[in-house]
Image: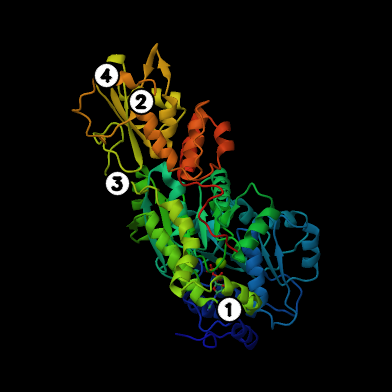
Amino acid sequence: MNTFQDLGLNEDLLHAITDLGFEKPSDVQDKAIPILLDQETDLVALAQTGTGKTAAFGFPMLQKINVDSRTTQGLILSPTRELCLQITNEMKQYGKYCKGLNVVAIYGGASISDQAREVKRGAQIIVATPGRMKDMISRRMVDISKIEYSVLDEADEMLNMGFKEDITDILSHTPDEKNTWLFSATMPKEVSNIAKRFMQNPVEITVGNKNESTNQVSHEYYLVNSRDRYQALKRLSDANPDIFSVIFCRTKRDTQKVAENLIEDGYSAGALHGDLSQNQRDLVMKSFRNKQIQMLVATDVAARGIDVDDITHVINYQLPDEPEIYTHRSGRTGRAGKTGISMVIVSKSEVRKIKSIERIIKKQFEKKVIPDGMEICEVQLMSLANKIQNTEVNHEIDKYLTSINDLFEDTSKDELIKKFFSVEFTRFFNYYQKTKNLNASESSSDRDGGKDYSVNSNDSRYFINVGRKDGYDWMSLKDFLKDVLELGRDDVFKVDVKESFSFFNTDKAIQQKVLDFFTDFKHNGRFVNVEVSEDKGRSNNRSRGGGRRDDKRGGKRRDDRRGGERRSNPRGDSGSRSDRRSGERRSESRDGFKNRSDRRSSENSSGSRRSDSESRTENSGSSRPRRSRR
Ligand code: ADP
Ligand code: MG
């Protein structure tokens, strides 16, 4: 392997490289630098994000330009303001011993006249986003007619973002005899078209396979029901206490919503999308870089500028529409020689997309299961134990130690440790002990069309005294139930209609609401009676006589049962059934969690109430299990 000296770089650059602590060239640097230094040629270089492309074109450009002249000789186009600033910053560091060097960044969202003034002072190198560059050319604020080297960085991203016209326009103002160096992570048709159009016999170099995602990234997917997506996200985060991640959503709205939910649930999260002002985006990115934000929820477009090295996880909250985009997402982790994990949360209907992504990245996904509550408790506990072990004692606490020691005089070390860890553990334990298994099975058939009427421990199964003779089939009964209960489409399932009675399931979290609603509900002049069925789906041959009707007015039996539940309610408040919503309130308080979506549930129509039933189980409000993170 070559050293930087071997590549032919001059003393000024080598000096800066030593300062930066780069020990040896990366693959793409090793291949590109000697070619660009020795030849006046066009170049197409394919390499993943995080492979050191900036230096691969930056070092040669710095060595080749004339710093004694104030003419603009180098132009670097990059897709986003973020990247533009990043490249400018890197170039300044690489060239810190090149006396007289002036690198100027040109990008939207900042004062154009300030930028024009900086250029006028004599910028040998301009780093620009296409939009602002074009603008400044048309206002004659820059002169790029003497450009000798132009770089199209992240060419695939620029084309993805619709900058083709702008790039064409900008390059038309540059001399024909310049050299163009194109850098890209992937090589879709549009990129090779651009290469053909603007370059002459470019030297091509490839690091790794074309379109292959980085080796340091492992790919995992988690199969869940759509309605459990958010809970799954939280568990993945809880199971990785030191997570530092980008979470990708498909739309700005989802991005905003997921971020808001995470924040309300006590996670250190932030949103990054195009509806935010530049200022807001800058703030979010700053907090993310400083690791004040552990989970950055972003759209694909907004995330293009993210160039942060230590990202441990990329989470695909939703898969992108185009499988190619997955490569860009997963490339945000596993950078600069580190390993990373790209996780995908998928529903059954999306599983096939995993296959097409595997073909593109030429790597296999590992199917993993969402950890259950107890695993998470264990992970969190051990993480805390490790953190404590590695904590340096802050001697500022010395002055309080006497009083603390007094307090624990009679507590043994063993007891003290138990108490200390319980503070944290209990919070997670209380939260997770009753939560359900989120993993969906790939093979299970449609919930209602299929024959599986069994109940899992997270569902409640009910008996209802209407059946075929009342004109219902499973579909119409399901519709009826979801309408009267104001539930979402997926909230009533495993509906099994018999001659004079039926069964159905809901999430256990809304059991109380269902029972309360039917306490004295009349339909077509008769009381509709609903009870929790104890036979867990093995009910088909059980005879249910008309005697059931005796219980219809919320008879003793049911009240007793509810009494039992009431006792398990930590707040002990059961409320009275004055309206339908009281049932909700009760089931919330029974879990000990405040329903943070109260506001939304009253605003929303039935279509989105699903998320509210989720809220009641895992989307907690004030009593979330999170430690606050700084
Ligand atoms: P890319 O443009 O390919 O995504 P960058 O040029 O942004 O990658 O480099 C990624 C990170 O790796 C940067 O922090 C950069 O300073 C660092 N880096 C680049 N070259 C080297 C090297 N030879 N040795 C160590 N770190 C490097
Ligand atoms: Mg780059």
- The N terminus lies in which quarter of the figure? bottom left
Q: Earlier in the sequence, mark 2 or mark 3?
A: 3
- Residue 382: % across, % down: 43, 68
Examine the image and state in which quarter residue 117 appears: bottom right
Examine the image and state in which quarter residue 350 appears: top left
Q: Amino acid at mark 2?
A: Val
Q: Earlier in the sequence, mark 1 or mark 3?
A: 1
Gap between marks 2 and 3 measured at Cα: 32 Å
Q: Earlier in the sequence, mark 4 or mark 2?
A: 2
Camera-nearest label, 4 or 2? 4
- Residue that label 3 marks: 442
Task: Check disc 1: other Cα within 10 Å, few if <14, some if 14-19, many if 20+.
Answer: few
Q: Horizontally, is 501 left or right of 417 in the view?
A: left
Task: Check disc 2: other Cα within 10 Å, few if <14, some if 14-19, many if 20+.
Answer: many
- Relative depth, front residue between 231 and 349: 231
- Residue 469: % across, % down: 27, 15
Q: Secondary structure at mark 1?
A: loop
- Residue that label 4 marks: 547
Q: Amino acid at mark 1?
A: Val
- Residue that label 2 marks: 530
Q: Earlier in the sequence, mark 1 or mark 4?
A: 1
- Residue that label 1 marks: 393
Camera-nearest label, 3 or 4? 4
- Relative depth, front residue between 495 and 341: 495
Gap between marks 2 and 1 measured at Cα: 60 Å
Gap between marks 1 and 4 measured at Cα: 70 Å
Q: Horizontally, is 293 left or right of 625 in the view?
A: right
Task: Check disc 4: other Cα within 10 Å, few if <14, some if 14-19, many if 20+.
Answer: few
Q: Earlier in the sequence, mark 3 or mark 4?
A: 3
Asked if 248 appears above or below 603 in the picture, the reply is below
Q: Amino acid at mark 4?
A: Gly
Query: Which colour assignment does the render follow?
Result: rainbow
